[in-house]
Image (spheres, grey):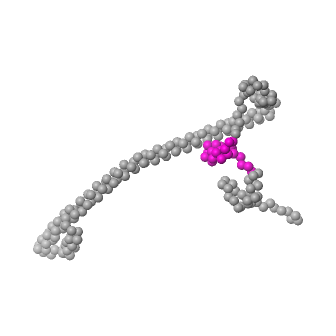
Amino acid sequence: METEVLENEIAAIHTCLLEPSCPEEYKEMEVLLDGLMDIKKAIAETFDPIIKKAYETHKEACAQKNRFEKPRQQAEEKCRSLMTAYLTKVEEAKAKLEAELSRQLKADMAARAQAEEDPEERARLEQEAASTRVTLTEAEPGELTSTAPKWTAEVYSLKDLCAAVAAGTVPEMAVTPNQTFLNQSARTFKDQVKWPGVRFVRTVAPKRKGR
């Protein structure tokens, strides 16, 4: 049934809906009710197939979406888990390195303090340090192989070192700012330039009267 016909029939019944005052009018109301039930059936026949088709389409669309979304979500969760694991390892390595540096520093300070108080200990440390140093001018050709190993640090890429400090994998104490250069730059550029991590501060020294 056409939707326009349904609309007209419903409107027509609305105009006839009056409170019955006699048995005949009551029977007329029964006829109107039967008509409304027929219209209900016609509405279902008209729109239920559309609703069913829309539901099936929606269901299929959701299934297609989940077919792609589920593996994408699994990949996202794995990606986040791997990133978290990496950051955890970096923090653990950083904490371990800082703890080792702190331990070495405390041990060195304790040894120096003990050496200052105990002349024999100071002499022992000096003798131990001297025994590990072998210069090319004093060593014989065959003696260099028995030299105790000595470790030193060589900075071959300052940018990489600074990047590692910024990433937190190397302690900040590994990089010392060149304060002389920075102060000279502040006097030269004043507030005309902006460097990341550096602030040029203007201070005014008080002058005594009469000068």
The residue drawn where x is 11% and y is 74% is 24
Q: For residue 194: magenta?
A: no
- Image side of residue 84 versus residue 43, left or right: right
Q: For residue 176: magenta?
A: yes
Residue 1 to residue 197: above or below:
below
Residue 9 location (% of width, % of height): 19, 72
Residue furthest right in the image = 210
- Image side of residue 85 versus residue 63, left or right: right
- Image side of residue 99 versus residue 64, left or right: right
The residue drawn where x is 67% and y is 56% is 195
Quadrant in which the N terminus appears:
bottom left
For this rendering, which residue is in front, 131 or 104?
131
Q: Please say whether residue 125 is visible from this viewpoint.
A: no
* Quadrant hosting residue 120: top right
Residue furthest front in the image = 141
Q: Please say whether residue 138 is visible from this viewpoint.
A: yes
Q: Which residues are magenta?
A: 155-179
Residue 178 location (% of width, % of height): 73, 49
For this rendering, which residue is in front, 104 or 79?
79
Residue 5 location (% of width, % of height): 20, 71
For this rendering, which residue is in front, 6 or 134?
134
The residue drawn where x is 74% and y is 53% is 182
Quadrant in which the C terminus appears:
bottom right
- Image side of residue 45 versus residue 122, left or right: left
Residue furthest left in the image = 24
Residue 102 location (% of width, % of height): 67, 39
* Quadrant hosting residue 112: top right
